[in-house]
């Protein structure tokens, strides 16, 4: 989704009308549905090939693939490619292009309100791109090293890599909790909208309901 958002922001800030035409809400809805269906289908094999097994050395229960071919697919296709290199490459490339487009907005005949909105949206997306880059790449690199066929059998090195893997996994899962805080810090409009929704709409609605409950009919 962040890859699609970065591409959309690049298209929205382009000077060519033919490219701007591709940035529309109908296409965004269709691509979002397609992406959701794709990732659901991609996750179905994990229900079949992943099982809870007991490690022979530590006797700990872990969830992993018992099929060697699927495990290689999980590491090299899913983690390193689909969840690592491909989205990072797309977001960095189109994020850089969107940043260049925004820098040129001042030289175009673009309405001031539209120009400021484009700048804020691009700032939000670019901060998210930078954040994703620094928390995705370490996990991808460590995973590639751990599953490398030339990895030495030194138990100290293996233990250090396993520790690094745990740390990078924790960092990787920041992907799912960070967008709200990033957008809150990067966009003044987002902060104002959040305050308006929480206090001007929901808090006042809750107070009116409380007053109505506390009132006693004559």
Image (cartoon, rainbow, N blue to C red):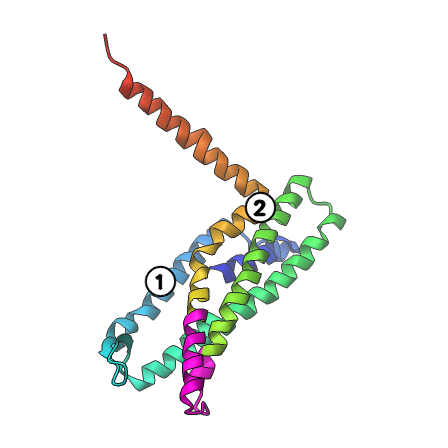
Q: Quadrant of residue 157?
A: bottom left
Instruction: Examine the rendered structure and indicate whether residue 79 appears above or below residue 127.
Output: below
Residue occupying the point 49% across, 68% down: 136
Q: Main secondary structure of the magenta part?
A: helix
Distance between the alpha carbons at the discs numbered 1 and 2:
31 Å
Vertical order, 31 against 180 (above or below): below
User: Residue 173 lies in magenta, yes or no?
Assistant: no
Q: Is residue 46 visible?
A: yes
Number of callouts in the render? 2
Residue at x-position 40% and y-position 88%:
155
Say whether marks 1 and 2 touch (CB < 8 Å). Answer: no
State the residue position of label 2: 187
Is residue 76 something that shows in the picture? Answer: no
Residue sitting at the far right: 107
The image shows residue 209, relative to residue 61, as above or below, that is above
Graded by Cα atoms within 10 Å as few (under 14), some (14 to 19) or many (20 or more), the crowding at tag 1 reads few
**Which residue is farthest top?**
218
At mark 1, the secondary structure is helix
Name the mark on residue 37: 1
Across and down, in percent, residue 34 comes to: 40, 61
Left or right? Give the position of 162 relative to 7: left
Q: In the rendered image, which quarter is residue 67 located in? A: bottom left
Question: What range of the chain is rendered magenta?
Answer: 143-167
Q: Is residue 168 left or right of residue 48?
A: right
């Amino acid at each position: 989704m962040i890859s699609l958002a970065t591409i959309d922001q690049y298209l929205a800030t382009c000077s060519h009308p033919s490219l701007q035409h591709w940035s529309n809400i109908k296409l965004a809805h269709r691509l979002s549905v397609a992406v959701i269906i794709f990732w659901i289908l991609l996750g179905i094999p994990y229900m079949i090939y992943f099982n809870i097994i007991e490690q022979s050395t530590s006797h700990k229960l872990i969830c992993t693939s018992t099929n060697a071919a699927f495990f290689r697919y999980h590491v090299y296709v899913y983690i390193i490619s689909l969840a690592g290199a491909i989205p990072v490459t797309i977001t960095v490339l189109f994020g850089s292009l969107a940043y260049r487009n925004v820098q040129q907005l001042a030289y175009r005949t673009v309405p001031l309100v539209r120009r400021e909105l484009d700048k804020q949206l691009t700032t939000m997306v670019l901060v998210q791109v930078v954040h994703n880059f620094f928390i995705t790449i370490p996990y991808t690199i460590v995973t590639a090293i751990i599953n490398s066929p030339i990895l030495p059998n030194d138990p100290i090195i293996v233990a250090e890599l396993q520790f690094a893997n745990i740390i990078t996994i924790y960092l990787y899962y920041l992907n799912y909790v960070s967008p709200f805080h990033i957008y809150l810090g990067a966009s003044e409009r987002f902060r104002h909208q959040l305050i308006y929704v929480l206090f001007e709409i929901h808090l006042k609605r809750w107070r009116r309901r409380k007053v109505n409950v506390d009132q006693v009919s004559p």
